Image (spheres, helix red, strand yellow):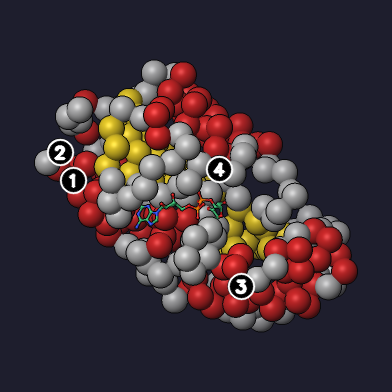
Amino acid sequence: MNLRLEDFRNIVFFTGAGMSKESGVPTYRGAGGIWGEYDYERYACQRAFDTNPEDVWEFHNFRRELYGKCPPNTAHRLVAELEDAHAVAVVTQNIDGLHQRAGSTDVIELHGSIWRLLCPRCDRTEEDRSAPLADPHCPDCGAWWRPAIVWFGDAVDRAVFQRANEALSAADLFVAIGTSAVVYPAAGLPRVAKAGGAAMVEVNPEETELSPLYDLHLRGPATEMLPRLITGS
Ligand code: NAD
Ligand code: ZN
């Protein structure tokens, strides 16, 4: 299948950990995945935060330091540059903020952001890029800040999910990049785009469970396949 991007008005990118891999951010699953080294029950779930916020912050400070050193890659930049000529939305499962750093302006973060803080007691939220976090306590009420990300066992924010659904229903081109499509409810979103009639492209070096849903498969790393998609070669 040959695609010309100029034929599309509403392009939605749906990105996962593979999008940021070439920036140096580790994926979760597979070789080098961080859940091989860290037990999420101790570091990344609500119960761990309730019982041992120090450990949870140790782990998230480690991630903030790591992610903060990772620059956006060519694929992030190409996605951002497409905004000059198309309506572009990015629906991402990543929490690293790299799409925004590359210049994308419409980014729906399904799993939140490692750079956002939420006070579970008074609901204050704040953007903060210090790494390690300068003060892990809310200045208003003194409670521990919680990283505003979706942990194991948390539900995806309904308003955010609704925005993602709307963007996907309006898409005429849907491009999934670097997602293994196994984590629900995010994994159900490509079907929404498909049902809305979007042309479907998958960028991933490997086959995924949802591969049969796509019209075009670009089997390779994001930084090599995105230039191909954009130039049509
Ligand atoms: P995943 O780790 O399950 O899957 C990553 C996918 O990326 C795989 O299918 C793999 O084949 C593919 N891939 C590997 N290298 C690639 C490359 N260079 N270019 C394109 N694709 C490549 O990740 P997931 O599907 O995103 O699900 C895991 C969950 O953990 C999600 O919530 C995810 O976003 C989150 N997570 C986020 C980050 C981050 O913020 N950067 C990092 C790890 C995991
Ligand atoms: Zn507070």
Q: From this view, report whether residue 155 is shown above or below residue 57.
A: above
Q: Which residue is drawn at 51% across and 54% down?
A: 94
Name the spot of residue 27 as percent of width and height, x first.
49, 61
Marks 4 and 2, how far apart at CA: 29 Å
Q: Which residue is drawn at 43% across and 41% down?
A: 208
Q: How many marks?
A: 4
Asked if marks 1 and 2 touch (Cβ < 8 Å), the reply is yes
The amino acid marked with disc number 1 is Arg
Residue under numbered circle 1: 228
Q: Earlier in the sequence, mark 1 or mark 4?
A: 4
- Which residue has dot 2 on it? 232
Number of residues whose C-alpha sits closer than 10 Å to that of mark 2, classed few (under 14), some (14–19) or many (20 or more):
few
Mark 4, ligand 1, within 8 Å: the answer is yes
Q: Is residue 51 at all visible to an observer of this figure?
A: yes
Mark 3 and ligand 1: say if the CB distance to the nearest ligand atom is below 8 Å: no
Q: Nearer the viewer, mark 1 or mark 4?
A: 4
State the mark number for residue 37.
3
